[in-house]
Amino acid sequence: MEVRGLGIMRWPFVKQTRLALAVQLAKPPRMPSPARHPETALPLVSIDPAQCSAPLRVALALDCALLRVAQVAGAFA
């Protein structure tokens, strides 16, 4: 993977995994409703890629999709 300003990096990987979340790169509503990807039926969240917190939001959304974090209201409630 290329990391701008650093070069080409080698990262550890797994050959297979199960999908748990679909992410749409778009500005989300302030309080999203639960949504599913129309073709895969995976939980679907919108994340604004322009926000510096976007990678952390994706990680938190994945934790919610995997039931590691409980949510009171929003995309996983």
Image (tube, rainbow, N blue to C red):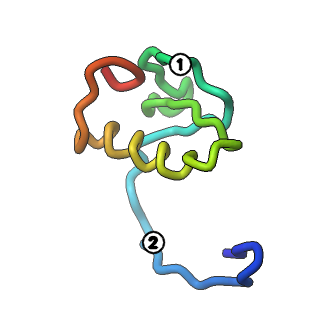
Q: Quadrant of residue 2?
A: bottom right
Q: Is residue 68 above or below residue 28?
A: below
Identify which residue is drawn at 57% across, 18% down.
29
Q: Residues within 10 Å of mark 2 (few under 14, many from 20)?
A: few
Residue 15 circle label: 2
Q: Residues within 10 Å of mark 1 (few under 14, many from 20)?
A: few
Identify which residue is drawn at 30% across, 20% down.
77
Q: Is residue 38 left or right of residue 26?
A: left
Residue 41, how many percent across, how many down?
A: 45, 28
Tell me the mark number nearer the camera, choosing from 2 and 1.
1
Identify which residue is drawn at 64% across, 43% down.
51
Q: Residue furthest front?
A: 52
Q: Is residue 49 above or below residue 46?
A: below
Amino acid at dot 1:
Arg
Give the residue at mark 1.
Answer: 30
Q: Is residue 21 above or below residue 7?
A: above
Residue 55, how many percent across, how many down?
A: 54, 52
Between 76 and 14, the one nearer to me in the picture: 76
Residue 58, how many percent across, how many down?
A: 49, 45
Q: Secondary structure at mark 1?
A: loop
